[in-house]
Amino acid sequence: QKEVEQNSGPLSVPEGAIASLNCTYSDRGSQSFFWYRQYSGKSPELIMSIYSNGDKEDGRFTAQLNKASQYVSLLIRDSQPSDSATYLCAVRSNAGNMLTFGGGTRLMVKP
Amino acid sequence: DVKVTQSSRYLVKRTGEKVFLECVQDMDHENMFWYRQDPGLGLRLIYFSYDVKMKEKGDIPEGYSVSREKKERFSLILESASTNQTSMYLCASTLSQASNQPQHFGDGTRLSIL
């Protein structure tokens, strides 16, 4: 059973701070990693993808991947109240075309 | 931009009814997926399809079937709706089977079975 684990939260950070969201996965064959943001009552929206070890930056978002530790994280700099949402980590191995999703971490950014 | 369209945002049906949820994508994507999302259980894959007339079971296919007669359309069918199928249903698609392809989601259908 392939598993993707996230702390459900809520993770509460003040406006302007760095929010750090973490995800671990069990399948060592995993090759592609995605972060989705989901606002309450809405569908998931892709915000970052990462495929190689190291950091990938896009605006205020940085994804970090460590395949040896089976760990992927998402950093949000200068957090805004509009970043308040649930963040889903998704992982795919080369063995199949399916994504395995974590349960999501709820982030609350307080003004 | 990828556009995945689900036919209904909200749907209310009765126990025992046959229910059809429709999903259409406009980007010539090969692969399409149906998930349900429930509080505390996350996203769970019901069925997926990687080509016209092809389908594969996901993690929770019981009580559901699917149809993919055309590349752009993937239908989820509840053969005889039950109250435990009340949920948010999400359709997604990807361009190809390449592992770096993300899934793009529709807006979701919130289905209530009374």
Image (cartoon, grey):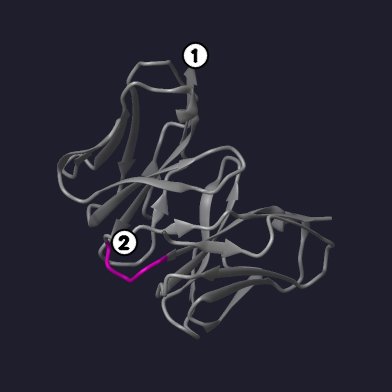
- The quadrant where residue B61 appears: bottom right
> Relative to A72, does residue B104 appear above or below in the rendering?
below
Most common SS among magenta residues:
loop
Residue B7 shown left or right of residue A85 in the figure: right
Magenta includes A95?
A: no
The span picked out in magenta is B94-99
Q: Which mark is residue B101?
A: 2
Q: Which residue is mark 1?
A: A111
> Measured from the top left, where is residue B92 in percent x and y?
48, 62
Q: Residue furthest front?
A: B1
Label 1 CA crowd tier, 10 Å (few <14, some 14–19, many 20+) = few
Along the viewing direction, whichever of B28 and B37 lies nearer the viewer: B28
**Residue B63 shown left or right of residue B80 in the figure:** left
Q: Height in image: B53 above or below A26?
A: below
The chain that hosts pointer 1 is A
User: Considering only vertical position in the picture, is A93 above or below A81?
Assistant: below
